[in-house]
Image (spheres, rainbow, N blue to C red):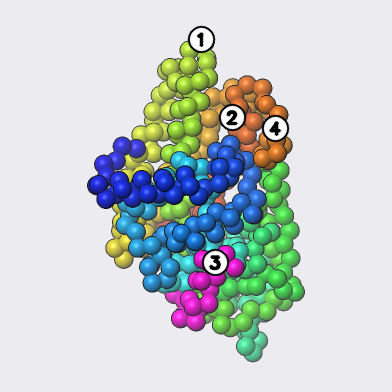
Amino acid sequence: MDLQFTPEEEAFRVAVRSFLTDHLPPALATKVKAGQRLTRADQEGWHAILNKKGWLAYHWPAEHGGTGWSAIQKFIFDDECAMAGAPRLVPFGLSMLGPVLIKFGNEAQKKHWLPRILNGDDWWCQGYSEPGAGSDLASLKTTAVRAGDHYIVNGQKTWTTQGQHANMMFCLVRTDKQAKAQSGISFVLIDMNQPGVEVRPIRTLDGDAEVNEVFLTDVKVPLENLVGEENKGWTYAKYLLTYERTGIAGVGFSMAALEKLKAIASRVQRNGKPLNQDPQFATRMAQVEIDLNNMATTNLRVIAAVQGGGVPGAESSMLKIRGTVIRQELLSLTRRAMGPYALPFIEEAQFAEYQDAPVGPKEAATAAAAYFNYRKLSIFGGSNEIQRNIISKMLLGL
């Protein structure tokens, strides 16, 4: 994307690029660029590096440990990190719970939990979806009943990303069965390392278990772990989801994927010519690049509005839809560029220890795994069909 930056913004870009050159571990960047599976240690290590620099919670207010960066600086940072091969930061504490606590949490909760998020003392997961409450999240069945100075929680959550690593979960629970669906929900913080919490892995198409089922049986949650007011959790959940959906757009990662696709298309031959000279393939690449540039501009506007005190609404749904469609198209084109070499699924290729040279282009080894895994993009964070309903209601009044 050809943006014009002020001299100060360009100096900031140079500073970020220099930092990444000096502090992003080359082996980690290689794994990210190759589409290989990251370990918990990989993710925690990068988290710690950014926290030490003071650049971790760059979207938080400065008084809570944020950077005070402008919308352009945030955009530049995301862009440079993606291009350098930095891993995506685990979003659950930083980008989801953090903003909710800053907006709705009490002072004791902010004082206790925010520093722990920054320091990496807690690994958070999200307890939203249930077997019968995915896109229709308001129909959730997990209950929390008051018993003295705590709640007793019973129910099941599913598609809990990285729940196998988590020691804490922010969770939606039903505290009033008689109220209208959205009105009887509360937002609580649950310690995963206690009796009654069981995590079961769900194997995905690429052989990984990054998503899980979580069973909650008579789990005790102290009343001080209620965020905001009882039965007002739906308000906090919607606030969190606007941040999640904006982040799912993944502009920086799509830009990095586009550059990778262009490099592949310039090397791979078809009918004696580079693939980027094939009219049909070149047309699809051009269209996805146009869409990505347009989305990047919209993303900047949304970030700027939030920085000015606004809250992303239907715009976050728009970004979520376009962002996921674009990322899936980039993965589809990358896999298509490999031709028949992308057909085999080589599970070993997802690990850094894999040394065998694949037949055909080197990118072919992980192309299929990435393509199939990221079909999920249009489902999680609220399916794209639901996002279209939100847009039609909020913007068109339908």
Q: Earlier in the sequence, mark 3 or mark 2?
A: 3
Gap in angstroms between the C-alphas marked 1 and 2: 20 Å
Highlighted magenta segment, given as a residue range: 104-121
- Give how far across and how far down residue 232 sits, in percent: 48, 75
Determine which of the numbered discs, if any, sits on residue 272 in the image. Answer: 1
Q: Could you say whether the residue bearing mark 1 is in a helix, strand or loop?
A: loop
Residue drawn at point x = 39 percent, y = 28 percent: 286
Mark 3 / mark 1, whichever is N-terminal: 3
Question: Tag 2: Cα neighbours inside 10 Å, few (<14), some, or many (≥20)?
Answer: many
Q: Which mark is residue 355?
A: 4
The residue type indicated by label 4 comes to Gln
Bin the neighbour count of mark 4 within 10 Å (Cα to Cα): few under 14, some 14-19, many 20 and up: few
Task: Choose mark 3 or mark 2, whichever is in front.
Answer: 3
The residue positioned 57% from the left and 74% from the top of the image is 188
Q: Quadrant of the N terminus?
A: top left
**What kind of residue is marked 1?**
Gly
Residue 236 shows in the view: no
Q: Is residue 255 left or right of residue 361?
A: left
Residue at the spot of label 2:
363
Mark 3 — residue?
119
Residue density around tag 3, few if under 14, some if 14–19, many if 20 or more, within 10 Å: some
**Residue 290 seen in render:** yes
